[in-house]
Image (cartoon, helix red, strand yellow):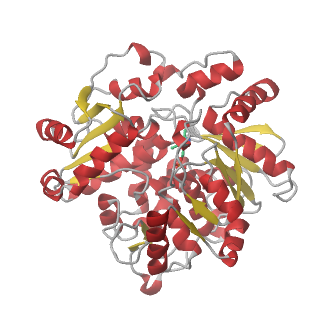
């Protein structure tokens, strides 16, 4: 490792330049920076080729400890991080944790659906819950987490945080507007301190309530309110690990690998960018969008333009604005916080911004971008099932299609192995998969009885006072 200046512990700064330095634990517990920006480490820890070669043969948990240790330097050591990862992933239903499955020549699928809620959010959330618990207990604190979900994040969070002494969690979801499997995954969590809250309204109503609670400073301090959405740095950290795991299996550091990542809030693909900054030889990161293609248009045109959301078969990627994109923007702008703040203010005011050609040249050398609409998604699921015998969920299909096109159109050097991230189990999005293949995908064994499990839900109207009252009564 290249030592940081003075060999000091890792520090974090906001992308808008007005908050920091602070340590790993403070960045973890506060989530969003006070100036509205997102926290990033002061510099990227760097592994040499020899360091990466030495990772061959580590278990998934050991690899997690090795990769996350520099980000927690001086606060949590490698052995403890390994133990936390061991515990976090103990219940996953595959011994490899993130198995790599060959699809065709040079194309591999990284299955990230072996956790309790069968979407990749488990890989981060299971670790995050343990990180929160550890930090809060050490400081003899208790926190209340309130979050809004359109599906996968909420079920992963309730499953990870249930029964933890130091935390009570309340997840708001739009009643009847998430998939039946997603809804039951939340409402069947019956445990101390974990609350699925069905809001009569849509996802925006849920988000508005959460925002109002965070803006109520008195309430915020009274209950020690915390956030676990994807802007929390500690959610990105565990996602870096599976990029290393996959590349090592394909011959890194001797061989370069490309990744295709179904993208919504830009969290997962940014973790891939971090892996590259840490020294993992990544040829390209392929950004795969559905018909909500604001990111694809950005890489094509050099301009970000906000448009209305158009609901798709891959709802976890139906976004207007990618919250984590600000981290890449900060990097592309030479880590200039003032300039990042200016561009983000411009974007908030006008719904658009553009970047100079020199900056876009750099962006395009790192990323390629593709889009796939619903008809294409159904076709990809059908074809991959028929030709390769693999059933993809709609999000994963968007990524596999982008990977196939990047191989076919010469974007990647010949024979570069490509890893497409499979972000959810097909049974999580049964309707789309059945429409494509004619067969209803079965839930994995540990969820086989999900739809018969007893439920507990708090039904509330979409108002901050109603949710506040619920939190105060139940925390
Ligand atoms: C959250 C999610 C995504 C989008 O990931 P980002 O990190 O927001 O880009 C894609 N697919 C599935 C299944 C998800 O749950």
Q: Quadrant of residue 361?
A: bottom right
The foreground one among 355 and 415 is 355
Q: Is residue 84 left or right of residue 95?
A: left
Q: Is residue 119 left or right of residue 385?
A: left
Identify whether 148 is placed above or below 277. Answer: above
Q: Quadrant of the C terminus?
A: top left
In percent of width and height, residue 249 lies at: 69, 50
In percent of width and height, residue 96 lies at: 59, 40
Identify whether 408 is placed above or below 51. Answer: above
In percent of width and height, residue 204 lies at: 38, 42
Residue at 34% x, 66% y is: 33
**Residue found at the very far top of the displayed protein:** 452
Q: Quadrant of the N terminus?
A: bottom right
Q: Is residue 367 left or right of residue 62?
A: right
Residue at 75% x, 38% y is: 102
Residue at 40% x, 34% y is: 155
Q: Is residue 81 left or right of residue 62?
A: left
Q: Quadrant of residue 386?
A: top right
Q: Is residue 275 visible?
A: no
The foreground one among 302 and 258 is 302
Identify whether 416 is placed above or below 174. Answer: below
The foreground one among 149 and 420 is 149
**Residue found at the very far bottom of the displayed protein:** 6
The foreground one among 297 and 405 is 297
In percent of width and height, residue 395 lies at: 61, 38
Q: How many marks?
A: 0
Q: Is residue 126 visible?
A: yes
């Amino acid at each position: 490792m290249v030592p940081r200046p003075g060999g000091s512990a890792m520090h974090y700064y906001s992308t808008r330049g007005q908050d920091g330095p602070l340590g790993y634990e403070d960045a973890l517990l506060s989530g969003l920076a006070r100036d509205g920006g997102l926290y990033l480490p002061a510099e990227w820890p760097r592994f040499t080729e020899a360091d990466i070669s030495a990772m061959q043969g580590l278990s998934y948990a050991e690899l997690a400890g090795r990769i996350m240790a520099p980000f927690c330097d001086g606060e949590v050591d490698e052995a403890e991080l390994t133990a936390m990862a061991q515990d976090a992933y103990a219940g996953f239903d595959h011994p490899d944790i993130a198995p790599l499955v060959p699809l065709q020549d040079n194309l591999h699928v990284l299955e990230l659906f072996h956790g309790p809620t069968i979407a990749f959010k488990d890989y981060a959330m299971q670790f995050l819950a343990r990180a929160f618990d550890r930090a809060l207990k050490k400081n003899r604190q208790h926190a209340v987490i309130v979050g809004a979900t359109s599906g996968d994040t909420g079920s992963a969070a309730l499953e990870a945080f249930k029964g933890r002494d130091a935390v009570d969690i309340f997840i708001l979801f739009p009643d009847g507007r998430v998939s039946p499997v997603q809804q039951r995954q939340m409402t069947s969590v019956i445990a101390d301190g974990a609350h699925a809250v069905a809001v009569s309204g849509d996802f925006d109503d849920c988000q508005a309530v959460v925002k109002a609670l965070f803006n109520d400073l008195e309430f915020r301090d009274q209950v020690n309110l915390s956030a676990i959405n994807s802007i929390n740095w500690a959610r990105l950290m565990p996602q870096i690990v599976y990029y290393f795991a996959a590349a090592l299996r394909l011959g890194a550091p001797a061989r370069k690998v490309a990744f295709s990542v179904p993208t919504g809030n830009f969290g997962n693909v940014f973790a891939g960018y971090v892996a590259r900054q840490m020294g993992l030889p990544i040829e390209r990161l392929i950004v795969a969008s559905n018909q909500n293609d604001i990111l694809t248009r950005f890489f094509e045109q050099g301009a970000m333009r906000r448009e209305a959301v158009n609901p798709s078969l891959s709802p976890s990627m139906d976004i207007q604005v990618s919250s984590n994109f600000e981290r890449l923007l900060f990097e592309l702008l030479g880590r200039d916080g003032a300039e990042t703040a200016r561009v983000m203010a411009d974007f908030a005011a006008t719904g658009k911004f553009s970047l100079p050609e020199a900056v876009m040249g750099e962006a395009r050398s790192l990323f390629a971008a593709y889009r796939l609409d619903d008809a294409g998604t159904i076709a990809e699921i059908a074809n991959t099932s028929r030709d390769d015998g693999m059933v993809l969920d709609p999000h994963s299909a968007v990524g596999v299609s982008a990977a196939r096109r990047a191989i076919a159109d010469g974007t990647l050097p010949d024979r570069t192995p490509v890893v497409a991230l499979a972000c959810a189990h097909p049974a999580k999005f049964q309707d789309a998969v059945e429409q494509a293949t004619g067969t209803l995908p079965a839930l994995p064994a540990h969820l086989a009885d999900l739809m018969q499990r007893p439920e507990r839900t708090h039904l509330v109207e979409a108002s901050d006072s109603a949710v506040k009252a619920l939190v105060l009564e139940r925390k």
